[in-house]
Image: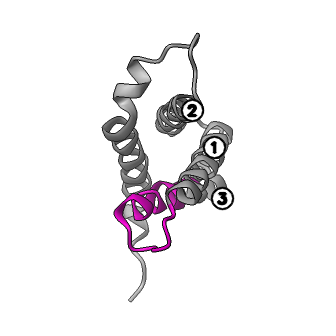
Amino acid sequence: MKPVKTFSLIASWSLRIAVLLFMIANYWSVFKTIDFSHLSLFTLLAFIYCLFGILLFIGGFQKSASLSVISGLLIFLVSVYFLVVNYKGSIMDVHFVIYIFPCAIGLYFFANGNK
């Protein structure tokens, strides 16, 4: 069976929306109450994560793929950091597995841009 190429645009936007919803669901409370005078590493990474999740969504509206590529790279790197930090000896732990999805989506947009 051949792939259905007409759904690739819908799939790409679904991935962008999924990352955006993941960021909002997990880090919006940290993002909206951020205090730059007392900044910890977690709040900085949560801010970067949310910011680049939003920028990945916005990058889909641009002709140039550079915003999507840069946002995908940062989402991938922060997700890898969270994967390393949340690894407790089992890859089946929910706190570990949950970061595999934004990591894979970030890598996809880093590799493909706005295709």
Q: Earlier in the sequence, mark 2 or mark 3?
A: 2
Residue marked by disc 2: 48
- The amino acid at mark 2 is Ile
In what quadrant of the picture does the C terminus appear? bottom right
Residue in front for this viewpoint, 42 or 13: 42
Residue of label 3: 111
- Vertical arrangement, residue 31 with respect to residue 109, above or below: above
Colour setup of the view: one colour
Is residue 103 left or right of 92 when viewed as pictured?
right
| Residue 68 screen position, x and y as percent | 60, 42
Q: CA distance from mark 2 to mark 3?
A: 20 Å
Which quadrant of the figure has residue 48?
top right
**In the image, is residue 33 above or below residue 43?**
above
Q: Nearer the viewer, mark 3 or mark 1?
A: 1
Mark-to-mark CA distance, 2 and 1:
8 Å
- The residue at 46%/37% (across/down) is 57
Q: Of the residues shown, which amino acid type is indicated by label 3?
A: Ala
**Quadrant in which the N terminus appears:** bottom left
Say which residue label 1 marks. Answer: 74
Query: Magenta span covers which residues?
Result: 87-106
Q: Is residue 44 magenta?
A: no
Is disc 2 in contact with disc 1, using a CB cutoff of under 8 Å? yes
Q: Amino acid at mark 1?
A: Leu
Secondary structure found at label 2: helix
- Which structural element holds mark 3? helix
Left or right: where does residue 112 sit relative to residue 7?
right
Q: Residues within 10 Å of mark 2 (few under 14, many from 20)?
A: some
Residue 49 drawn at (x, y percent):
52, 37
Q: Crowding near pointer 1: few (<14 within 10 Å), some, many (20+)?
A: many
Q: Earlier in the sequence, mark 2 or mark 1?
A: 2
Q: Does the segment drawn in magenta span residue 98?
A: yes
